[in-house]
Image (cartoon, rainbow, N blue to C red):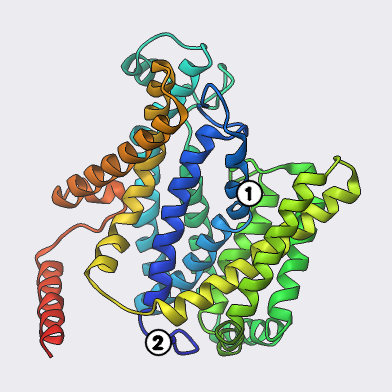
Amino acid sequence: MQATTGMTGRQYGLDWLRIGAFALLILYHIGMFFVPWAWHVKAAEPVDWAVWPMMAVNPWRLMLLFVISGVVSRALLGKLAAPRGFAASRSARLAVPLLAGMMLFVAPQPWFELRDRGAYEAGFVHFWLNDYFEFGGSRGTPLPTWNHLWFVAYLWAYSLMLAALAALPARVRVLLQRGFDQLFTGWRLVVLPMVWLALARLLLHPVFGETHALFDDPYAHAIYGFAFFFGVALARSGAAWTTILGQWRALLGIAALACAALFAVHGMSDGTSAWETARLLARTALAWTAILGLIGFAQTHLHHDGPVRRYLTEAIFPYYIAHQTIIIAAGFWLKQAGAQTGLAFGVILLTTLLGCALTYESARRVNWLRPFLGLKRVTPRSLSATAAQEVRSQSFEKL
């Protein structure tokens, strides 16, 4: 069942794609424990072959989430009508769990990291009470930190910028949308963003890197800010949706070829500028065609509802908040125990899934805890609405 152009109504395909993207992100962070790349806590012996699947998803996994977030934000903005209401809603759902995450959920991560480096000996309670809130980096790690919750911080900042744009006169907003529709249609929908992404990677990344520190991260904003606001405009662009829904198979085919090219370049590169340029081009083509292709696939084949979607749509944000702390803790203790790679992976995966499920199931049942994990408070009115929705669903299933 295909979504209508212009994104009218709930887009279940994007819900499923968002769920899948967050699940992939959790697996990716488990992989970061094993690959040779730098991370908070590393396995004693890196697994070199794990680089290949990680490299296949790295260029597009986060950009995809920002594009989907932009589409969803546009829909929410239309539902709440007033920009001030949208800003308040996004702040409650993003800023509150961000602050709670920095103070509580993320705090064990730098403690495990420092312990793994042999740079800290005291227990976690002492660390949290005496050292975590130093607002500095005396131990080589900035404290306090938001670590993986940088995504939430950036999403909140972009949401506030969207609220400011929504406060512009209607004629200006119409012109902005019309400009997007004219610029990003047909082949330009594919080529122009790739040019932008390639230039950002070529010109900004070598100078600024990617800090995830919000205020000194121009490269990340050029990538993720672009992705978010592209999604905002895409939500109401019939021309762009026509291209995506009509060409998603070809786009995924190009993404597969670009991935193969990226693998080939990685295997043959000698580090010269020519090879690095080839890597950049392959990475850029993979990133953007995979994003558009996956969106088209999801809207074409996953546009359906059900209790699993409803459960996971709410659960996935608490899972995201909790998952990295669980991965780092499990990886640290398994490394201390000398666990073999295969056993370590299985234990980390199982522990992460169980820990995330326990976190969500606890939060959804404790009303005061819900906002700290990005869940709406339960009110009598919302309970009545949920009960009515369940009755409608049961009545539909009986037909």
Point out the image quarter for the C terminus: bottom left
Point out the image quarter for the N terminus: bottom left
> What residue is shown at x 54% (from left), y 85% (from top)?
170
The crowding category of the residue bearing disc 1, from other C-alpha atoms within 10 Å (few below 14, some 14 to 19, many at least 20), is some
Number of marks: 2
Q: Which residue is mark 1?
A: 55
Q: Nearer the viewer, residue 389 or 262?
A: 262
Relative height, residue 111 to residue 50 (above, below): above
Residue 27 spot, x, y in % from top left: 45, 46
Snapshot quadrant of residue 133:
top left
Question: In 3D space, how far apart are the residues under numbered discs 2 and 1 (Cα atoms)?
Answer: 32 Å
Snapshot quadrant of residue 283:
bottom right
Snapshot quadrant of residue 349:
top left
Left or right, residue 96 beside residue 52:
left
Q: Nearer the viewer, residue 341 or 115?
A: 341
Residue 248 spot, x, y in % from top left: 58, 79
Q: Which residue is mark 2?
A: 1
The crowding category of the residue bearing disc 2, from other C-alpha atoms within 10 Å (few below 14, some 14 to 19, many at least 20), is few
Query: Helix, strand or loop at disc 2?
Result: loop
Left or right, residue 47 beside residue 17:
right
> What residue is shown at x 60% (from left), y 84% (from top)?
240
- Callout 1 amino acid: Met
> What residue is shown at x 46% (from left), y 16% (from top)?
115
Pick whichever of labels 2 and 1 is earlier in the sequence. 2
